[in-house]
Structures are given as C-alpha cells and as structure tokens.
Amino acid sequence: MIALIDIGNTRIKAALFKDQWIKDCEFSTLEEWALLKSEFTKAETVVIGSVVPEKTDWFQDLKDGRTFHELSHQSPWSFQIEVENPQTLGVDRLANMEAVVGYEGAVIVVDAGTATKFDLLEGVGKKTFPGGAIAPGVQISYEALMIRGAQLKPVDLEKHSPVVGYNTETAIRSGVLHGFAAQVDGMVARFFEERGLPAGTTVIATGGNSKYLPGRARFIREYRKRLTLEGMLGIAKKL
C-alpha cells in the first residue's frame, strides 16, 4: 500500500493507493491528522510533497519501518527541469507535471488553489518543464476585495451569475468568477502564443477552485481532481 500526502497552503490532501484509490481525505489541523494517522501507518511506501515546511514535521514518524520519500527537485522525475534555481520550485507543480508526462505533445496545467498556477510541459519523447506562472488565487482576490471595499458585503460564490450583473451581489460574483475564468483563458492564450503551441494542445485544470471554471473558461479540456496525487504516485512507483 502507498500513502501520499500533499501539504498545501490551505489544506492537506492525503490518499492511500493499492491497485486502486482506496482512501481520499482532506484536513488542515494536527488534531484531524491524529484521527487519520493509524490508517496511513499501514502503508509500506510514503511519499510527501510539501509547500509548507512547518507542517512537514507532522508526518516524520511515518519514516519508521517503511520506504519514505519527500519530494524535491532531485526526485526521480520523468522530465527535465529547465527552470532557474529548481530548488525553489513548489513540488506540487513538479508533481502535476509528472502526472501528465504520458500525454502526447505539450500540456498546460492550471492548478487553481490558494494560488493559481499555470505550468507547461512540452517536448516529444523526453519531456521538459520550462516553467510557468503564478497568480493570486480566486479566493485571495475575493477576500482582498471584501477587505478593501468598505461598502461591499460578502456574496455566495456558489450561485450562478451572468457576466453583466444586475445588482451589486451579482456584479461582485461576476467580476470574481468570470474574471477568474477570463484570467485563465488569457494566460493560456499567452502560453499558446509565446511558445507556438498547436491549437489542440491539452489544457488540464485541477485544484479546489477549478470548480468555478466549467461553463466559464473556454480553453480547459479536462478536469482532474487528483492530479497532484497522481504525480506523487508516479514517483512512489519508482522508489
């Protein structure tokens, strides 16, 4: 059995895999982890990917008696990393690239979480990761608007809104959500233009805030909720 733990800025995603996915969970506190931990100690292999170093220590006792690997730029990736200072890369971005390495041709991944990350994997045969872009996430933008707008009141982002809002609530929801989708489409279009990518290039969305993109973003071709964990699983199978 393989345990995968993806430590993000907002939430921690964890999964168990044995021939198939047998458990998925999300949590954010050490107390929640204490309730889940016994199941994960049954794994023979543990792979951790963390962008929050202070939370990585929560899982150090999983090292005992099993194969344990913490992702870094030196992990056995199936692609060449071509960015400057690869040691500064978020390992979640690298895991996303690992998850899509089997696709034919170039792939753009839009990971909509605390930040919205746009990353490119390209090449034929041996794939390369030349880099990408990082923007504030939709939730960060929304919260900043609420803080700075003295007369603005919180709105329910889960509701539908037309592009042309007919009151303040729908105008906020439109600006936040349609604006987010327009940012995604605009950035993807610039990737296509700058790198000369063909029209059929695969664009995949993942991350918790990708739920706001269907019906709004025009370039997304696939939605893969477990993408980061899938990439981590690819590394686990090489250990």
Image (cartoon, rainbow, N blue to C red):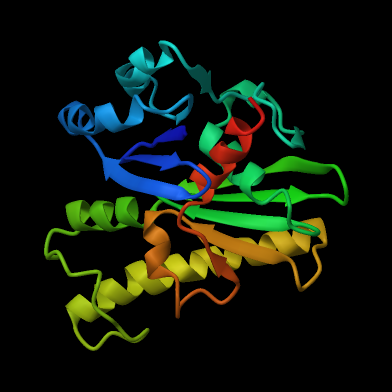
Residue occupying the point 70% across, 57% down: 107
Q: Nearer the viewer, residue 159 or 230?
A: 230
Where's residue 224, x and y in %?
Answer: 51, 60
Residue occupying the point 54% across, 32% down: 91
Q: Is residue 146 left or right of residue 74?
A: left
Instruction: Say if residue 233 shows up in the picture.
Output: yes
Q: Is residue 79 left or right of residue 34?
A: right
Determine which quarter of the picture holds residue 150.
bottom left
Count of numbered marks:
0
Q: Nearer the viewer, residue 68 or 90?
A: 68
Q: Residue furthest top?
A: 64
Q: Is residue 174 left or right of residue 90?
A: left
Residue occupying the point 30% across, 19% down: 58
Determine which quarter of the picture holds residue 169.
bottom left
Where's residue 95, x and y in %?
Answer: 58, 39
Q: Nearer the viewer, residue 61 or 169?
A: 61
Whether 109 is drawn above or below 72: the answer is below
Instruction: Say if residue 115 shows up in the picture.
Output: no
Q: Residue furthest right?
A: 125
Whether 226 is drawn above or below 205: the answer is above
Residue occupying the point 29% across, 44% down: 26
Whether 32 is drawn above or below 226: the answer is above
Where's residue 31, x and y in %?
Answer: 15, 28
Where's residue 112, x and y in %?
Answer: 45, 54
Determine which quarter of the picture holds residue 200.
bottom right
Q: Is residue 194 left or right of residue 2?
A: right
Quadrant that contains the C terminus: top right
